[in-house]
Amino acid sequence: PDKFSKSKTLWFEKFKKGSRRFIDVGDLQINGPKIIHFPQNLLGHFYNFFYFENPQRTRQLKRLIRDHVHYKEEIFELAERIIKKLGDFKFSCLHIRRNEFQFKDVWTPADKIVENIKGLFKSGEQIYIATDELSKGDDHKHFDPMAMTKRNKHTWFTPMLEEYGEENVHFLDEYFDKLLVSDVPSIWVGCVESIVCTRARVFIGTRKSTFSGYIQRLRGYMHDVGQKMILDAQTKYPEEYYDAFIGPSWAMFPHATFGGGHPYWGREYNEAWEGVWDPIS
């Protein structure tokens, strides 16, 4: 818009980079209507689509989502039982999404994942793997949340067991019967695992997985999480990562409407939590 300063205009152009159409809701007398209907699906994150000229409004929206759109307190308390066993920030975590996942381009073989993430884990470190891979052949059916709570040989993960040491690699089935069995509805199983992952020293997710994405956002919200860089098992560390940009991070990558090969919804961005703790005057 004409009223923007030169620097704001540049940032705004980067914000809406790609084929997206700009709608000025100020023209709709935003203080009047309680509901605004958008005729197209805003498939992505709220901070990818709503731009406020006043950064205070942006922080207010981010804080609203952080404080009021989240898991129940009971889920955090259940996850704490596993976190205490592993030690807060005393372990690292992988999320491997496979099973019926429709994006077969991210069905990265286990040995390739080990190669991609070399250097991210410490020698002898405890590794927690959150996954829906049942290691029972190629017949991947609709996922049963309780399937990973049953004892499993985890043969698909053999390259990781060999690389990190079988005694150092942990899955949900190791803890479920002892710590969670009587208190966790099936619909909460994935939620509990995601909270466990938020307290890892290093978290590595799966590209295009919104489950990984929400873990990354929660880690961004947490003051004491040191590693906030978005890492995924499909990208070779460190040479395939970008670490410098100007403007929204989804606008920095070579693919105009994609962030590093992701659709907008396929990963989180640091804008989700940047400024969320800053004072609002």
Image (cartoon, grey):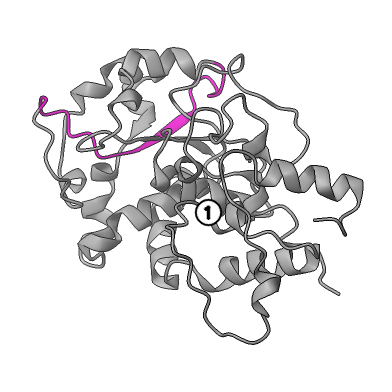
Residue 273 falls in which quadrant of the image?
A: bottom right
Say what secondary structure mark 1 lies in.
loop
- Which amino acid, mark 1? His
Name the residue that disc number 1 marks. 45
In the figure, is residue 112 to the left or right of 122? left
Q: Residues within 10 Å of mark 1 (few under 14, many from 20)?
A: some
Residue 230 falls in which quadrant of the image?
A: top right
Q: Nearer the viewer, residue 125 or 155?
A: 155
Figure quadrant of the C terminus: bottom right
In the figure, is residue 158 to the left or right of 48? left
Residue at 75% across / 57% down in the picture?
275
Q: Nearer the viewer, residue 264 or 167?
A: 264
Residue at 21% across / 35% down in the picture?
99
Figure quadrant of the N terminus: bottom right
Where is 53 relative to 257, above or below?
below
Where is 123 relative to 136, above or below?
above
Give, as a single range, the part of the protein colored magenta: 119-138
Residue at 11% across / 29% down in the picture?
136
103 magenta-colored: no
